[in-house]
Image (cartoon, grey):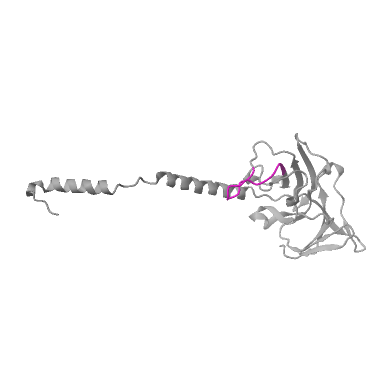
Amino acid sequence: MTPDHPDHDQEDWLRVVFTRSRDAYPLSQAPVGRVLTAARARRKRRRAAAAVAGAVCVLALGLAVPFSKSPSGAVRPARQPSPAASTTVAPAPGTVSVRVAEGTTDGLRWSVALEFHRTLPEGYALPTYPDGTTAPGTSLLCQRMYIGGTRIDHQAGPWADCQPVTGTHDPQASGGMGLHGLHDKGLTGSRLMVATPEADVAYAIITLSDGTQVKATTATVPGTTYRAWAAPIPDAHTITAVDQYDTHHHRLTHDTDWR
């Protein structure tokens, strides 16, 4: 179709045609709502992932006693900690805090204590998984490890070494083993090896690269089934083997993968 108007009327004609085309094909609104919703979802997932990573905590209870060899060549445990080392330390309401081991390694004092909070402490939030669900737990189990007066993982906050548990008998809190230190994620420097063994493990013997053996006796938090052992690993030493035994001295596990 061509206009039969004079040339000076073509501008008006084009304006009419454009208006008709615009009305025939209305523009949709920009999806602002969907964009904002997607952005909020991505931000929520990132925060949830960070919370789970930060909520990573390794939990255990240990008692480590260095071995020394007697003149006859037999291996015997060194002096046990004094009774004061195993008593409750300044318990807060609803919390049982137990000093389970202490000693000296590389000239530095080290200690391991376990705190069981019967209810979740004020200010602690259960971690959230990336799918948006919340980790289960009604109580909190915290492993406090110190080397040279500095608490391991203190940079991540007061609950970095804590794990949510359900009551006093949560099977999810057992079966782990790890090396913990102040440097390089426990790969260098003075370290503590902590395990949360199964119920039949009575003690472990850690053999170091220089032939030194360390005996770590399993201890149980009073009134709970949470149990663990721990041993100090001096700087520049590696682990040759970790053997776990039952109360009848039968070897249950033999692990040579640790360094």
Range of residues picked out in magenta: 126-140
The quadrant where residue 116 appears? top right
Left or right side of 55 for 107: right
227 or 67, which lies in front? 227
249 or 146, which lies in front? 249
Q: Does the magenta stretch include residue 137?
A: yes
Residue furthest to the top in view is 93
The quadrant where residue 243 appears? bottom right
Q: Residue 201: give x, y in percent of width and height.
A: 83, 56
Identified at 22% across, 45% down, the residue is 19
Residue furthest to the right in view is 72
Q: Residue 67: give x, y in percent of width and height.
A: 84, 57
18 or 45, which lies in front? 18
Left or right side of 51 for 119: right
102 or 51, which lies in front? 51
Q: How many marks?
A: 0
Residue 160 to residue 201: above or below = above
**The C terminus sits in image quarter:** bottom right
The secondary structure that dominates the magenta segment is loop
